[in-house]
Amino acid sequence: MAGRLSFTVGFLIVASVGLLPGACAATTYTVGDDLGWTVPPNSSYYDEWASQRTFQIGDSFVFNWTTGTHTATEVSTREEYDNCTKMGIILLDAGVQVTFNANGTHYFLCSEGTHCEQGQKMIIKIGDGIAPSFAAPSLSAAAAALSALFFSTLAIFFLN
Ligand SMILES: *[C@@H]1O[C@H](CO)[C@@H](O)[C@H](O)[C@H]1NC(C)=O
Ligand SMILES: *[C@@H]1O[C@H](CO)[C@@H](O)[C@H](O)[C@H]1NC(C)=O
Ligand SMILES: *[C@@H]1O[C@H](CO)[C@@H](O)[C@H](O)[C@H]1NC(C)=O
Ligand SMILES: *[C@@H]1O[C@H](CO)[C@@H](O)[C@H](O)[C@H]1NC(C)=O
Ligand SMILES: [Cu+2]
């Protein structure tokens, strides 16, 4: 009886640590590092930045810009990303922080002018890049304003 109880408790601890987003050293990245999120010097800049890193569940991304007008817009498909389709979930505020709590592939671009065509776009692959089949509430399901609020809430939650 006691053995079974401690097994159960042990299992619960392991299970909840495994489920805790960010339990294994979640990292906050500033997209583009010192350059921030802007029109890059060449069109492969952000792809190179992302491909040099491995992102995991719980990681956060800060889209930071100090000059110019930009957006961090998430579009839902690779095709929209390739096409620079400027419709999606738009995060308008400089310094907006996004946290991902599931594996998946996310497509971000700037919807201002021709910034996307000039390379202000980036694919963020979390873990194996495959979204879980049970559809957790996703960014694309939420209204832009709500998702911005959602994100800031999440960010505050995980940073504290
Ligand atoms: C893009 O610009 C970055 C930073 O200047 C540089 O390190 C990289 O080699 C460039 N890539 C290409 C394909 O020109
Ligand atoms: C955003 O950019 C400014 C200016 O480059 C910098 O001082 C600040 O630390 C950056 N913020 C983040 C979260 O990277
Ligand atoms: C992407 O562009 C191609 C060629 O212009 C077009 O056929 C296709 O419908 C576009 N797809 C999306 C999702 O915008
Ligand atoms: C997420 O991806 C990582 C690394 O690719 C993998 O080890 C892990 O099992 C995946 N997690 C889920 C919940 O699918
Ligand atoms: Cu822009």
Image (cartoon, grey):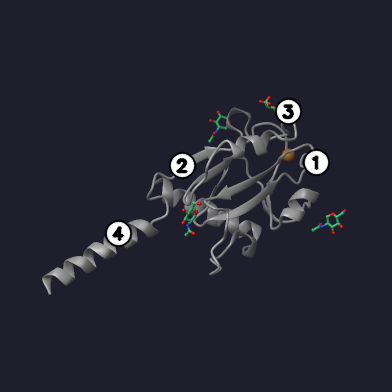
Distance Cα–Cα, label 2 vs label 4: 21 Å
Mark 4 beta carbon near ligand 4 (under 8 Å): no
Q: Residue 7's x, y, as percent? A: 20, 66
Disc 2 and disc 3 in contact, CB within 8 angstroms: no
The answer to whether the residue bearing label 3 lies less than 8 angstroms from the nearest atom of ligand 1 is: yes
Quadrant position of the N terminus in the picture: bottom left
Gap between marks 3 and 1 measured at Cα: 12 Å
Measured as percent of width and height from the top left, residue 105 is found at: 61, 53
In the picture, the disc for residue 41 is: 3
Q: Residue 14 got which mark?
A: 4
Amino acid at pointer 4: Val
Task: Please tell me in which quadrant of the rendered image residue 87 appears.
Answer: bottom right
Check contact, mark 2 vs mark 4: CB within 8 A: no
Residue drawn at (23%, 62%), measured in percent from left and top? 10
Which amino acid lies under the numbered mark 3 shown in the image of this protein? Pro
- Residue underneath mark 2: 27
Q: Quadrant of ligand 2?
A: top right
Q: Is ligand 2 closer than 8 angstroms to the Cβ of mark 2?
A: no
- State whether residue 37 appears in this view: no
Q: Nearer the viewer, residue 22 or 139?
A: 22
Q: Earlier in the sequence, mark 2 or mark 1?
A: 2
First along the sequence among labels 2 and 3: 2
Q: CA distance from mark 2 to mark 3?
A: 26 Å
Residue identified by numbered label 1 = 117
Question: x, y (%) of residue 124?
Answer: 60, 47
